[in-house]
Image (cartoon, rainbow, N blue to C red):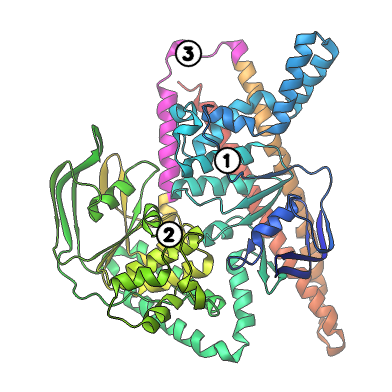
Amino acid sequence: MITASSITLQRGTKVLLDSTSLTIHPGQKLGLVGQNGCGKSSLFSLLRNELQVDGGELYLPSNWQIASVAQETPALDTPAIDYVIEGDVEYCELQAKLERAEQQGEGEAIALLHGQLDAIGGYQIRARAAELLAGLGFDEPAQASPVHSFSGGWRMRLNLAQALLCRSDLLLLDEPTNHLDLDTVVWLEQWLRRYPGTLVLISHDRDFLDNIVGRIVHIEQATLNDYTGNYSDFEKQRAEKLAQQQALHEKQVRERAHMQKFVDRFRYKASKAKQAQSRLKALEKMTLIGEAHVDSQFSFSFREPDSLPLPLLTMDEVTAGYGDKQILSKLQFNLVPGSRIGLLGRNGAGKSTFIKLLSKDLAPQGGELDINPKAQVGYFAQHQLETLRLDDSPLQHLQRLAPDNTEQELRNYLGSFGFHGDKALDKVAPFSGGEKARLVLALITWQKPNLLLLDEPTNHLDLDMRHALTMALQNFEGAMVVVSHDRALLRATTDEFYLVSDGQLSPFNGDLDDYQRWLSQAQANSAKSASESKTASEAPSRKELKRLEAEHRQTLAPLRKQLNKAEAEMERWQTALEEVEQQLADSSLYEAKNKAQLQESLERQREAKQKLEQAEGQWFELEEEIDALNQQFSAQFAD
């Protein structure tokens, strides 16, 4: 158990934590949220023992193994899979000891070390590393490629694989979904839900938090504020607190009216019933959570375009790629004002290639691409952060676009993107990735685009800025094409999805839940094809079959152990729920003198229901995973 008792942490003159306390129990999955600079990463440094508290006491069990993602990746010649394995310090130390013992012929030490390697799963480490890398988007050739051959984003995926591979009691993840695409985010989400240790997660992805954590710690005013439930639960609870502040009430009403306007606008588009239903649910949810962001420093909207030409662009038999490599072929597509399209597709399918076509960053290799001369394109991609002039300020960047506007007008505008006061005059060079992304969005918005092309616009943006961007996009009058791993943004801002797959672009008749099922089916089909391609000569012998069955049982053993634990938890909380509901059936409990006891019983009932639901959910997930593994194993030997 981790306990922080009245801890204080100060960096320079800024007090990040002030006499605040927190307890984290083993196995809990906790989301850590708060505005940029509030102390989230510093708290991670405390947990890694890289910093010491300035007051109070912080206790971590001395025998706990802690895993986190390295922030730097040297340009090594080491193959990717070996680099990931080298991140498991415990395994590497045992291997080194084993090699020394073998060189010196120490039989007893060799036997002992083999046993220790077996205990930590050392003999399966390469298979586990390959599985992690495959989940993070590395195919077999990529796994064998040297580390130096990968870009910065892919190197961060290698560091993430290192952290996931290590045996750990505490896993610290700081923005793990940055640089990931949607299908990889979904895979990571499923992996973390099965992780048996204690997880502390910093993320600005609302859906990612919702689907993993059962507790939120919000750092605000140098205090660790504890909330039970996922991120959406936190927003509702915090909204209730904020709603009590009369000064914020009018702004809340305006935001609700704003969101309702878009619910009404979209409600009657019957041609896309399934996607409409998903969008409406998202907007209804945003109506509930909007109040949690009323104190945000970000509040902006897209300026009205000068014109809305029809059509904005058309494609006829367009082919695109790089050099001799063709990525997309024979695309038929047209875009009109009001189109709100989300692009889906597996990593490497060509989503970014399609966006580059639309932005003219990439010329078609064949076919006709006709872009209306009145199209005013606002294009956001991560590489554009590098086009900012590092020695200039946000104000100077904007003055080049608006030489006729007064300085005060421009500073007021920059303030809506969080560049208040002297921040608007600071050089861009030391800005964080999030601050640079906000500045690029501010410059795009100022130019009144009628066509928005957004390629992962939420990378580095915090939750408040993501909320502000979502609100602004809902009010955007032009056309929009967006690639994003942020499912909350996609649900709330897009009207239709297009799928990029097998070099083609086609409408996707479904919502994001359907897309997740499509991904699972595509993976299952790939596995089935691989299995069917085996020849009869590859069929295992009886001895080999017994070995494979033993390995399969070994694979299932920890899952069955977790399943039994979940069953015990279900029984425990079902019993607790029955006991408290029996107490609540006593009419005397509702008398005024028993008010405190009643409140306690109601709280116990709420907790029992929540814990029972969590245990049942975990049981169903484990049961499905075991069934899937059994089916996969059986399919290997089917005729």
The answer to which image quadrant residue 32 occupies is bottom right
- Where residue 546 sits: x, y (%)? 64, 16
Look at mark 3 in the image and give the residue it sits on. 538
Mark 1 burial class by Cα count in 10 Å: few <14, some 14-19, many 20+: many
Q: Which residue is mark 1?
A: 159
Say which amino acid is labelled 1: Asn
Residue contact at pointers 1 and 2, CB within 8 angstroms: no
Determine if residue 182 is in view. Answer: yes
- Kind of residue sitting beneath label 3: Glu
**Up/down of 43 relative to 470, above or below:** above
Q: CA distance from mark 1 to mark 3?
A: 36 Å
Query: Image point 75% across, 46% down: which residue?
Result: 565
Relative vertical location of residue 513 with respect to residue 364 in this rendering, above or below: below
- Does the magenta-highlighted stretch encompass residue 517? yes
The C terminus, quarter of image: top left
Q: Residue furthest front?
A: 391
Q: Is residue 437 left or right of residue 17?
A: left
Q: Position of residue 519 (x, y in %)?
A: 42, 44
In the depicted structure, whether residue 533 falls above or below residue 481: above
Give how far apart the Cα atoms at labels 3 and 2 are.
60 Å
Classify residue 117 by image quadrant.
Answer: top right
Label 2 Cα crowd, 10 Å radius (few <14 / some 14-19 / many 20+): some
